[in-house]
Image: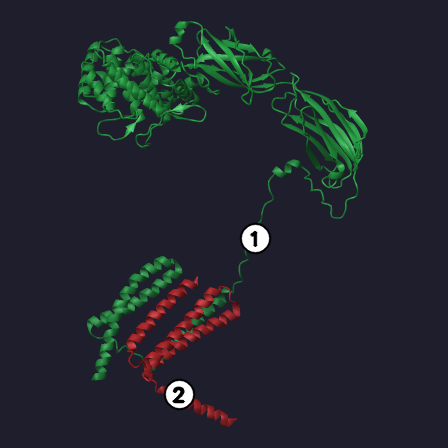
Chain colours: A green, B red
Amino acid sequence: MAGGLSPLATLLLLLAAAAVAPLASAVRPVSDAHRSAAAELFAASSDGSFGDLETTYEAVRTFQILGVEKDKSLTGKACELAAEKLSSSSLSPAKDLFHAVRISGVLRCSVDSGVYDDVATRLKTLIKDTNSLLELYYSVGGLLSIKEQGHNVVLPDADSTFHAIKALSQSDGRWRYDTNSAESSTFAAGIALEVLAAVVSLADSEVDPSMIAVVKNDIVKLFDTIKSYDDGTFYFDEKHVDATEYKGPITTSASVVRGVTSFAAVASGKLNIPGEKILGLAKLFLGIGLPGSAKDCFNQIEAFVPLILSLPSKVFSLTSKDQLKVEVTTVFGSAAPPLRVNLVQVLGSDSKVISAETKELQFDLDNNIHYLDIAPLKIDVGKYSLVFEISLQEPEHETIYATGGRNTETIFVTGLIKVDKAEIGILDNDAGTVESVQKIDLQKDTSVSLSANHLQKLRLSFQLSTPLGNTFKPHQVFLKLKHESKVEHLFVVPGSARQFKIVLDFLGLVEKFYYLSGRYDLELAVGDAAMENSFLRALGHLELDLPEAPEKAPKPPAQAVDPFSKFGPKEEISHIFRAPEKRPPKELSFAFTGLTLLPFVGFLIGLVRLGVNFKNFPSLPAPAAFASLFHAGIGAVLLLYVLFWVKLDLFTTLKYLSFLGVFLVFVGHRALSYLSNTSAKQKIA
Amino acid sequence: MPRATSDAKLLIQSLGKAYAATPTNLKIIDLYAVFAVATALIQVVYMGIVGSFPFNSFLSGVLSCIGTAVLAVCLRIQVNKDNKEFKDLPPERAFADFVLCNLVLHLVIMNFLG
């Protein structure tokens, strides 16, 4: 796959020929950020190696594609590692040979042709013996890499190898890893296609064209399983997510793309895959931005190179007569071949076609930018979608570069909004006779001085128009009245097609104004993202004479002294716990503890007085033992109760009690029935 | 009044004489019940002095004593040979009941003690 970029791009062109889907707007080419990220991710350890053979290959290949220069000692180390693996006579697995051959291919290490002949023979034997897809991938891939490095390698029975691999394919276009596994995998499908491509290019004779056609059909089926995100990004993922084998969308998609491109490069004829899916995959790899892991970085870099159209800036000001600038580069950020960029359509924010006239963009050779003045486009402030088409100037380039069909970019146009015919005045309530109307200039702060009572109205009107003379409706138009006592009232100024006009009828507002007479400051705020001269103007003040507040009138809310204090720390909440109960003095409690023992002492004395004895205790050993166990059992249960009180919970206690209870019932029954028998005998005697 | 005092004396003396005739095992049970009730009384007095704050502890202490006394009285009823009602019940069986009931009672008491 070394040096496989141009066939890959060829395929992209073939596939993208029918593409009509718009490309993403946020996609930017691979940049220096990727280069530094790659250098960081594939950092060599202190002894100058990249770790194992696979990581080393991924590192050197990524650096090769991105054009990152590495110092000689690093490449020397990698070459040594590969050569050591290749020449070792021990039986190294196909995987190691594969990576070693590819490393020396990328770095152009000098390896004896004898060593390669030896390796090729070993790989050929491996191919014959295995039916595992991965083993075949490593060994066939190794052979192909040797062939690409200028050695003559031929796979003797290509047809049978081809059939062996094809036997692993499934009906849905996925492949199995070997004949024993039941699971099919999308990742394996990519691998299999790569192996098949390698087999075809290694074959000594032509591979059966009907088999090629069958595989092409498999590829089409595989693309039916592609998944998509909402933004038109496509990706491949495994159907069954298995924790051990799972690779993730990037690795899986990269595998499929590598397989499909290499297969398309060796197979004649066209693959019937919708172009939007190919572009969607390109968006996946570019949309990732900077990859997080070395593996993702490798997979992202290896997979794609279409031409990318991008805008350095997406906001244009009508005031400063900005030019519409378009960059066309390859994915890796290098300059594109000579080409024409046409603006074919301008769509408004509601997808309405504003202009469908094709306009060619001028090319600035020095800055490598295509540009167009936006003034002749007659577009007003707002949000627009621009549709571009790229056409290559030289026909032979069309076999190398993929242009990606139509590209849609979203832009934002801003401008100065003209404010005029601003008037403010007081109207009498009946018939609306104008008492005093003043023209004001909203370009600067004014200080009109008005006075009104609750029977009159305040009227404010003005007009807004865009640079092209259309009416303009900003997001925010507010009139603010602020009383001396800092009570504020905000009114939205409604706009009609021609003008913005608000009439405040104070009769209906007295309650809202809390019957607060006095001086109100007037402020007007007009703002919009597309409006370059958004403003907040002080208009002046209004002396308002409102009637006395009735008794039940709502009081104005208390105004915070510092308006930011509501964001300050909240008052600390002091928690009140229940006060502890009064406890008696310790001495008293101890005294009563002793007192409760007194009746027990009295009980013992009473027993002695009564002449209690243990004569009835069984004298025979077995009954005596049972009687002792009975008493010990009762003691144990009581001890358990004490433990329950001190530390155990109910469940543990009941668990132990169930065992003790059974034991107690058993020995109790034996002991008491013995006593019962003896007393019965005594009665009879 | 002296006559009444002597009558009371006579009464108590005859009661003591009659009680002396009760079997020893019943006397032991009586003594046990008295001991339990006395302990309960001491706890009640303590409660009267300092208040009933850990009320569950007070309850379980007093009820433990009262319950024990009641069970002892039950045992006494069953063991007493003059009670024809329990003639067929061997005293060993009654004692087994007494032990079992005490164990169950005190399990509950311990749970309630806190």
In this rendering, position of residue A526 left or right of residue B85:
right
* A491 lies above or below A140: below
Where residue A143 appears, x then y in whole percent? 23, 15
Dividing the picture into quadrants, the one containing residue A76 is top left
Label 2 neighbourhood size at 10 Å, few (<14), some (14-19), many (20+)? few
Question: What element does badge 2 sit on?
Answer: helix
Q: Residue at x 34, y 81 (%)?
A: B26
Front residue (pair A577, A264): A264
Amino acid of disc 1: Ile
| Direction front: furthest residue | A431
| Direction bottom: furthest residue | B3
Where residue A454 appears, x then y in whole percent? 78, 38
Q: Quadrant of the C terminus of chain A?
A: bottom left
Label 1 neighbourhood size at 10 Å, few (<14), some (14-19), many (20+)? few
Residue on which disc 2 sits: B16
- Does label 2 lie on the same chain as label 1? no
Amino acid of disc 2: Gly
Tag 2, which chain?
B
**Is any atom of residue A538 visible in this view?**
yes
Mark 1 vs mark 2, foreground winner is: 1
Question: What element does badge 1 sit on?
Answer: loop
Q: Which mark is residue A544?
A: none
Q: Quadrant of the N terminus of chain A?
A: top left
**Is any atom of residue A70 visible in this view?**
no
Front residue (pair A566, A557): A557
* A631 lies above or below A217: below
Q: CA distance from mark 1 to mark 2?
A: 62 Å
Residue on which disc 1 sits: A576
* A175 lies above or below A552: above
